[in-house]
Image (tube, rainbow, N blue to C red):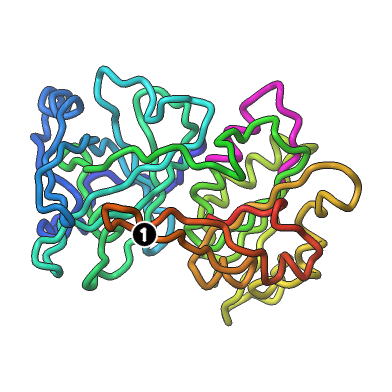
Amino acid sequence: MLLPKRAITHSARLRTIWAATTVLCNVAASASSASSASSSQSCSTNANANTIMTVPSYPLIDKWQQSHDSWLLRFSLPTDQKHLGNDPTLPTCISVHHNSSLDNGKILKKSYSPVSHPGTVGTFDLLVKAYTPQPGGGVGHGICHMKPGQSTLIGKLKKERLVHGSPIISKRWDRIGLIAGGTGVAPLVQIIRIVLDNPEDNTKISVLSINRNEEDILMKEELDALANQHPDRFSVKYSLTGNKIREDWDGYRGRGSVEMVKAALPPPSSSDGKSTMIFICGTDGFRDMWGGPIARAPPLADGSKGPKIQGPLLGVLKDGGYNASDVFKY
């Protein structure tokens, strides 16, 4: 994986840390202490049950700034754990636990999909945006202000995500289209790596990355490199929505349209007999515009939220002729 040029380890800008709002516990900066912490587990309070549960911890070993408010962070796995997930061919997702000082110490949780291949040995990488802390939020801000060698992420691996009934991604469709809004590119990059790294997979991938301004485009260096390495299987297009677009910008403009879909993404499965799957990931409003909202099943017996369900296909993709079976909304 290509790493950003702006590698930063112990920047002076990070010496003032919001300890009360970060998702971390302090560990010794020495290599021996870091090694010890890598196999540790941390206790956090379950805000719903008011009990103590054991949650794995992952030391931060390096970080690279991707934009003015986004970072790529690399965490190490416990010494007895080879991969983050149970199956190195399936996408992974981790639920990060954050002790919020703005919510009376309540444990907040936010899910992040690594941008590294799930088969990566010993480490995993997260792409995180540092949103301004506010009540009920601030997880990303805490992660981005962690110090390599001195901070540890607290998080729990989530269950495998079922995409229309199965977690399998590789060799499942003839074509994959990926629509990313901002940091929504993260889980889609993991899908790209899974497919392209499998020598037996001939799936073609088309990416449409939509951002406000050109400097906001995340993972661009990596995506462009993959397009050069796999010209027959991988393509990427960009669209900007802000008001600072340079005159010679050769990408698209706007949040999305049927015309953009036809130019940048594979056609619906019904068009030619080949199978297509379109993945959408971004903010709720971004996802709703492209494919409609995600719904929830009724609450479970224990009072917890019911599982997410895809809901009907709406928005730009419906107007573009796709069926619900052609689309998956993150």
**On screen, 249 above or below 278?**
below
* Residue 273 drawn in magenta: no
Residue 182 visible to the viewer: yes
Residue 49, horizontal then vertical, whole percent: 15, 52
Residue 228, horizontal then vertical, whole percent: 70, 40
* Residue 203 drawn in magenta: yes
**In terms of image quadrants, where is residue 31?**
top left
**In terms of image quadrants, where is residue 148?**
top left
In this view, which residue lies farthest toward the front?
Answer: 301
Residue 308, horizontal then vertical, whole percent: 47, 56
Start-end of magenta stretch? 190-205
In this view, which residue lies farthest toward the top?
Answer: 80
- The amino acid beneath tag 1 is Pro
Residue toward you, 298 or 293: 298
Q: Residue at x 79, y 52 (%)?
A: 266
Q: Could you tell whether 271 is left or right of 24 in the image? A: right
Q: Residue at x 32, y 55 (%)?
A: 110
Q: Residues within 10 Å of mark 1 (few under 14, many from 20)?
A: few
The residue wearing badge 1 is 299
